[in-house]
Image (cartoon, rainbow, N blue to C red):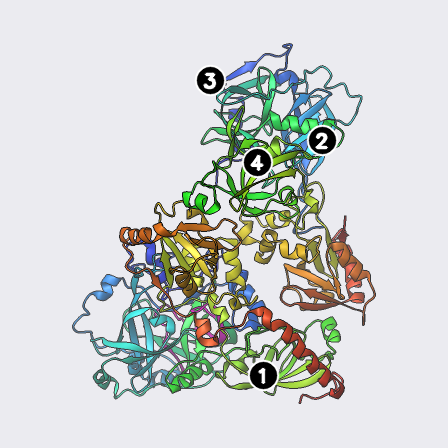
Amino acid sequence: MGNLAMTFIGAGVAAIDFAGGGFYTVLFPSPALARAEPSTLPPKLIRLRPAMMKCPFRALMAAILVLALMWAAESRAQSAAPAPAAVPAPVLPAGVADVPSAAEQADVSQIEFGAVVRVEVDMLGANYRVPWNIGGTGSGVGTGFLVGKNQFLTNAHVISNARLIYIRKVDLPEPFPAKVLHVAHDCDLALLELIEPGDFKNFEKVTPLEIGGIPKLNTTVTAVGYPIGGDRISVTRGVVSRIDFRPYSHSAVDNHLTIQVDAAINPGNSGGPVLQDNKVVGVAFQGFSGAVAQNTAYMIPVPVVNRFLKDIQDGHYDNYVDLATSTINLLNPAQRLALGLPNDGTGVMVVNADASSSAAKLLLTGDVLLAIDGHAIASDGFVEIEGERINLNEIVERKFAGDKVKIDILRDGVKKSIEVELRRFLPYLIQANLYEQKPQFVLFAGLQFQPLDRNMMEVFNIASMDVRYFFANYGDHELYRERPQVVVLTAVLPDEINTYLEGYVSHVVDTVNGQKIQRLQDIYDALKDGVAEKGHEDFHVIRLLNEGRPLVLERNKAAEAHARILRKYNVSFDHYIEVPLIEQVMGKMPPIKDESPEAGKEAKPENKAAGPNGKPAGTAKPE
Amino acid sequence: MKNSFRLLASTLVLPLALVIGPLSAQEKPQPVGADGPSPSNSLVRVNATLQAYNFLRPWEKGNPTPRRGLGALLSGGRVLVTAELVVNSTYIELELPTTGEKTPARIVGLDYEANLALLAPVDEKSQMLAKMVPFELDLTVKAPDTISVWQVEDNGDGVSTDLDVLRATVGEYFVSGSILLVYQVKGSLQYRANSFTLPAVRNNKLVGLLLSYDSKELTSSLLPAPIIQHFLDDLNDGKYDGFPSIGLGFAQTLDDQFRKFTGLEQVKGGVFVRNVAKEGSAAKAGIKEGDVIVKIAGKEIDSRGNYAHPIYGKLNFSHLVRGDAKVGDTLKFDLIRKGKPLTVDVKLERREPGSYLIDPYMFDRGPRYLIFGGLIFQELTRPYLESWGKDWPTRAPFNLVYSNANPEKYEQQGREKLVFLSQVLRTPATLGYENLNSIVVDKVDGKPIKSLADLADALNGVTLNGLHKIELEDYPRLIWVHDGVSRKVNDQLLGYGIGSLTRLE
């Protein structure tokens, strides 16, 4: 049950870094590529975004195997080998003698296969265990398709951690070097372009694929791509099975609208178009391993694709925004009676709006959400959009940073309408798979300090209760306010100066030389000359959370030992530090204690003011 | 993980051939009818039926299971066994190995932390044990003495196996976290029927009870006579106090840099106090985190935490304050605090498991619980967490595992027990709540819940609109249940096979 074995074919590099040779030669499907959730992370730790969904999806996530559908079947050696000088012109499936119905034949024969490209990637992972070294290398194959002038859409997981990217056209032998224009790890999409503008002349006669809409259930769709099983383009067909909110396995923390199809979609299909009436209705991206379920593949639907394409129009990707508000469905008659609601199947109750989220102080525990942007909210958390019942978060999903959402609520029996300006919510990222990262660390006298995130947690497989607590509750308990980065002593490189300290790894660092450690930079600064704990000027003093025994190093020996250790262990640089992302985006946050009494103060007068003017619950219409 | 396992488990899987196989080199048959103690006239078979409580389905008890072992006869017609042999027992009987005669028995003394129990026939007039020869204790065994482990064959014949004592140390017995003196012994042993609790003897005197045997390393650990003596003395004074505990964690001070930092340059040895348990003996005496203990009761503590025991040599100081000491004893501690010497008197105490916010162990009684309309509330105990299996620290709900390790927050809130919603049965009263589990309960109808009794009182109190408002520590923070509907559901649950809706005592 705890084995949330999400297989990231494309993202597997970091996971196999340290296996030995480092080369990525395993053929899919192989257990060696399956990245199992470390046993230290019980399924409950997975905080899925948006927070509103966290209850139902916790259970789901624990039970499934999701595969990102990039084909990493080639070994490094194979992909480095020169491509054959001449590739025979592919026999396109449209030309294959077949006896499809007239309608189906028309469907396929119109497809612009020239727009569907093979994306070949050489990857370089990060090394979290020995952070001054580079990580493992590997290669993989995915699919992409032309959506505009020199713009190829594919999955983020196809090009994550890419060192080199090549695009191959269906009817040409040579690979064209490409680069990433934009990548959205939170919805698994990326836009590529050919590095040499001149290379695009090969595509000038190709019509970019047109983006369509949301297909209806039980209608036929066609997936085109370069999946496992051969080198040339492949076409498979199926029907739309389900339209639902689902976790996206690439980041492991995001949920968006997803469409399930029963077409055969396999590793290598990733990033490829799924077509209906010759228009793109989705981007193939993940599926179940055959051991879990059959004929269930998923594609990223048009609303998500369009949102990405619109977001990047200003030249950069700004990520999804989030209400970061958890709710509970209002199905229980006692709940409804207590909240003053009739049994009409409407409304969900606010459990908590994260204190640093867009909705902080605007939505309070016990508020009932009645409608969002005019869409009535059913008591199971669904709204109706374009004739489909979809999770209410879909309304927020389609918006951008700075957009507003209008929410009709019932508070203490009084209806009111509030407006929330949406912005990105970052604390959940601590549990996300991160890509294109240079591991941050500070090494001092053999003590290796690193900030807590999912990548680091998985590499070190930390069982310490405190570290697991911070990992699980960083967002929910607002621990990021006191510690934007949770700094952990992850390793000790043995030397005479630290030989008694090895037993203290996997602890959270609380203070260094009297300075509170709120981020990695603080450790680096605290170890400088002139910073000392009062009364212990001759020592570096490192105090760990919930550990009474401080770690001490004599100053006059530490500098010498540090130089010796760098030499002995071949450490090429002794620190790499970035401003924590959460502070880059959200700024420095005041400690939690300064704010919470205020929140209470503000909430109360608001209630009073609303009280006398409010209409009785259940009779008033939404404002 | 040590590759050692309890004798019972091994007994079950070994082929019968071994039991009646030829005697090994170290084994020799013991004559019956000798004057002094012998396997045949000093050992008693003990047959117990055990039935543990189910902590995950708290209204149930588990499968009844048999456990057989050997007891050592002591004076006064009492039979000494490990507590583990009779834990959660529903029925115990004594059996003579020679004749097969049986009599029902009762527990007259019991300490799970010391893993010792004393049994006696229920029938006070029973003469079954009268002709047998009781053991005396030998407290003087040390390395490299040779001792013998006694067993009996199915036909009642005695067998003795010689083992060599390697050393005395401290280790865990049966209740996790309870550290007491053990002898490590070496030598091969064959399993026989009834091999749970094997008495070990020297010169026909009892030197200990075998706790575990590692068949790969051929090493065993022995619960030694000094601990047995402590247990018996304590019982004999009419009021059983148990073994005291000091309530502190320590770190070694081998690191020269750390010794300088702590001001130990002019001092020999000493251990650094890493943490002090609230309400423990050390805390009450004023020992603080950061103190260095250099002497206890005049005995020097070295930088590894050992002192020189007159018989065993280097031994961890925990024996000095637990196995070797009695509740109520006062020991002088020489400390270094911020570089300066200091002396405190520590009065040794013991805390009952039930006095902790989260009971560290619970036997012979069921966990407290309350079912209301399908919501199942329980008090958190360590056995509840352990019910999730061997890897419970990673398998059990993390928030509860974390609470168990960090109870201070809840203690400061004045809670006596940690009440939580353990699971929800799907009923008309719990519609929409089916997936909730493992959430700490803060308040019910505005009243703080400090124990399950508080919860029962609150749910029996006056309701507003006929509803109970339940405030939870975590998602979904707030739920309501209908009083009338829940009570109807309660009746249905009883009809459905849940024997009882509460256990409050």
Q: Are marks 4 and 1 in contact (CB under 8 Å)?
A: no
| Mark-to-mark CA distance, 4 and 1 | 67 Å
| Looking at the image, residue A474 lies above or below residue B207 | below
User: Mark 3 or mark 4: which comes first in sequence?
Assistant: 3
- Outermost residue toward the right in this view: B462
Please state the chain letter of the residue tagged with numbered disc 4 in the rendered image. B
| Mark-to-mark CA distance, 4 and 2 | 24 Å
Tell me the magenta residue range: A248-275
**Magenta stretch holds residue A265:** yes
Tell me if residue A42 can be seen: no
Q: Residues within 10 Å of mark 1 (few under 14, many from 20)?
A: some
Q: Residues within 10 Å of mark 2 (few under 14, many from 20)?
A: some
The amino acid pointed to by label 4 is Ser
Q: Are marks 3 and 4 in contact (CB under 8 Å)?
A: no
Viewer-proximal residue among A172 and A476: A476
- Residue A572 figure quarter: bottom left
Q: Are marks 1 and 2 on the same chain?
A: no
Find residue A384 and name its label.
1
Q: Nearer the viewer, mark 4 or mark 1?
A: 4
Q: Nearer the viewer, mark 3 or mark 4?
A: 4
Residue B321 x, y percent position in the rendering: 60, 35
Q: Residues within 10 Å of mark 4 (few under 14, many from 20)?
A: some
Please state the chain letter of the residue tagged with numbered disc 2 in the rendered image. B
The amino acid pointed to by label 2 is Gly
Find residue B109 and name its label.
2
Read off the residue under disc 3. B25
Read off the residue under disc 4. B318
